[in-house]
Amino acid sequence: MKKRQGERSRKAQVRIPFPVVLANILVFVAVFGLSYVWLCARCDTLGQEIKRLETVQRETRRRMINEQDRWSNLLAPANLDRALKRHNLAMHLPDEQQIVRVRNIAGTPSAALAYNK
Amino acid sequence: MKYKGRTIITSVAIATVFIGLGIRLAFLHLRPSPGTLARIESGRHLEMETRGPRGRILDRNGNMLAVDIAAKHVCVDPKFILQYGDVKAVYSALASQFPADRAELWKELNQPDSQYVRVQKFVREEALGPLRNMNLKGVIFEDVPIRDYPKGVLGAHVIGYANYEGVGSAGVEQRMNAQLQGVAGLRISQKDGRRREIYQLRTVDIEPQQGADVYLTIDQQIQHFAEKALDNLMTKYHPKAAWAIVQNVRTGEILAMASLPTFNLNRFSTAPAEWMRNRAINYTYEPGSTMKAMIVASALDCGAVRANDIFDCENGSWYYGGATLHDSHPCGRLTVADIIKKSSNIGAAKVALQMGDAKVYKCLRSFGFGDRTGLELPGEDAGILWKTDRWAKMSITRIAMGHEVLVTSMQMLSAIGAIANDGIRLRPLIIRKVVNSKGETVLAPQPEVLARPIRPETAKEMRRLMARVTQPGGTATAAALPGYLVGGKTGTAQKVDLEHGGYYHDKFMASFVGFLPVENPTISIIVVADEPQQGGYYGGTVCAPYFREIADQTVRYLRIPPEGFTTEYVTEIETGGSGEESISD
C-alpha cells in the first residue's frame, strides 16, 4: 500500500517542461492582436481627424470665397462712388490749365520739352 | 426535484435562444443570403456626388464679376419639432428672419406627418448668423452653392447669369458654360449606424474639379464709365433704351459693353425680359448717317471719288428713282470731305451712285454688314443687307444714308474700327483667356483679321475726314475732346413704322460712333439712343456728349497721351503758387 502511495507521489512530482514555443506563439499572437487593435484604433482616429480637417478645409474655403465676394462687392466702382459721396470726397479730373504735356523733340527721342498748353 | 426540472428547462430554453442567435449570427456572417447581403450593403452603402464649383468670371484685371459662394436652404422637420421642440419659438424665429407668408409658415410647421419642409431657399451665410445662434431643434441648414455677382448690375448683359441649377442661361455664362461648369466629384464609402461615413471604408474618392476661370476683355472701370454716361443720357433725354460699346481698335477687344435699361444679376428672375436684352448685339436698326462713313471710304478706296471732288447737294431736295431725297440741313455744292462733315444725304447718295450697286454691296459686305461679327456672346444678330437683285433703283441712294439696311451697334463699331485700324477689320473679342483649376491657360483668343475693306492710305485719309465732324462746323462738335483729335460720325435715323409702313416722323434712332486719337487710334466708341423723348433727337446732340464723357474718362484711365505728346503730368497751377509740381501720372 505504502509502495503504491510512493509511486503516486513520484508521479505527481514529475515536472512538466514549460511550453516555451507555445508561450512565444501566444505572446506573439497577443502582441500581433494588440498591434492590430492599436493600428485599427489609430486608423480610426486618423480617419476621424482627416474627416474633421476635410470639413475645416471646406468651411475655410467657403468662408474665403464668401469674403472675397464681399470684398469684390465693396470694390465695385459704383460702390466706391457711393462711398466717396458719403464721405464728401469730391474727386474730379484736373482742368486743362493744370496739365503739363511732354513731347519728344524730333531727332532727339530722349530729350523732352515740357510746357503748359 | 421540482425546482431542478424548471432550472433545466429554463437553461435549455435560454441556451436554445442563444444557440439560435449564434446560428443566425453565423449564417449572417458566414453565408448570408444574397437578399440579406444586398439589404445590408444598401443600408451601409454611401455614394455622394459632389458638384464642382462653377468657375469664376473676371474682368481683364482679375476683378471678380461672378463666383459660386456657399449658401443654405433653411429647412424644418415639423414632426420632430412637434414631438421634441418648441414650435412657437421656431415659428417666431423664422417669421422674424424671412419675409414669408406667416399663416403659410405656421401651417407648414404644424404638419405632424411631414419631416421636411423648405422654408427659405438660397440664404447667404451672413444672413444666417442669428438663426444659427438660437440652436433651434428641428431646423436644418442644407448646403447649396449659389451664383453670386458681386458687382450687381455692372456688365449685366455681357456676364449673363446661371440659373438655379447652375447652368449658364445668358451672356458669357451661357456661351462659356462648358468651360465654367466644374466636373462633379464622386465618393463611395460606407456609413455607420449613425449615418456617418466610415473613413477607413472609403473606396472611391474623386475630388470635384472647379470649372475654369473666364477672364473677359472688359475693364470694370471703363464699363462703369460707359454705364454712368448712359445713365446720364437716360436721365436727360429719356430714350426707351441706350447702349454703348468701347473697343480697342488695335486688338478688337471689347473694353465695355453697356445697355440700359439693365438689371441686377443677383435678382435676374425678377427682371423683365426687355431689360435683359443686350441691345448692343441683338438690336438691329437702320443706322442712318453713320453708314456714310463706309460709303465714302469705299468710294475713295476704289477711286470712284476723291476727297476734293465736288457734288451738288441740290439745296436739300433731290428727286431720284421715283422719290424725293431730303437733307435735314440744305446744302449747295459740297466736297466729299464736306459731305461727311455736314452729313449730306444727297451728297452721300451721289457718291454711292458713282460706285454702282455691285461695288456698294461688295464694300458693305466687306465692312461686315449682313454677317455676325463673331463675338463670343449668344444671341448676336446678323442684321440685314439685301443682295443687289432685291434692290430698287433708289435703294443705293437710301443705303448710302443708312436706310434699307439693318445693322447692330457691334457691326457698326467693327466697321468704324476698320477705318481706325488702317483698313483691317478685326473680330471683336470679349474673352481674354480661360484658365483651368490648375492654373493653366486653356484658351487665349488672339486678334483675328476678318477682312481688309479699304487700303491703309484710304483709312488714313478717311480718319482725317471724320476728324472734321467733331470740329467747328461739323455735326458732332459735342464729341470733341480737348487735347485729342476725335474722328467720328453722327447718325439720326427715323424709325420704321412696321404697322403702317414707311417711317415715323417722331421716333428716331440717334447714334454717334467714333475713335481717338485720330493719328494713332486706340479706342473706338459707339453710343446709341433709341427714341429720345425730350431735348433733341440728333446723334450729335443726344449721343455725342456721352461719347465724349466716356472717351474723356477712358483716355485718362488708359493713359492714352494726346496727339503728338508722349505723356502728361498734372500741376497744381491754381492752388500751387510755389511753382512746385505735383505729379500724379
Image (cartoon, helix red, strand yellow):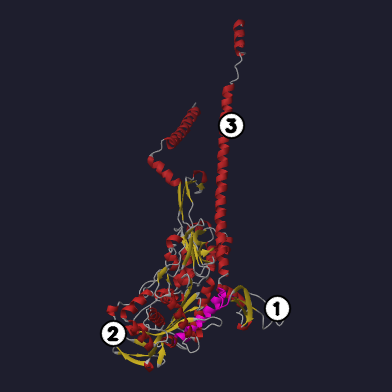
Q: Give the amino acid type for the residue marked by disc 1 in the picture.
A: Glu
Neighbourhood count class around disc 2 (C-alpha, 10 Å): few under 14, some 14–19, many 20 upward: few
Disc 3 residue type (three-letter): Val
Residue that label 1 marks: B580
Q: Position of residue B443 (x, y in %)?
A: 46, 61
Considering every residue shown, the one lying at the far right of the view is B578
- SS state under label 3: helix
Q: Could you tell me how far apart the alpha carbons at marks 1 and 3 are, in whole angstroms?
A: 86 Å
Chain of the residue where label 2 is placed in the rendered structure? B
Image spot of residue A105 (x, y percent): 60, 77
- Element type at marker 1? loop
In the picture shown, does residue B45 fall above or below B505? above
Most common secondary structure along the magenta stretch: helix
Kindly indicate whether the residues beneath marks 2 and 1 are on one polypeptide chain: yes
Say which residue appears at 57% left-offset and 22% top-offset: A21
Tell if the residue under mark 2 belongs to the same chain as the one under mark 3.
no
Relative depth, front residue between B353 and B124: B353
User: On the image, numbered disc 3 is attached to which residue?
Assistant: A31
Looking at the image, is mark 2 or mark 3 nearer the viewer?
A: 2
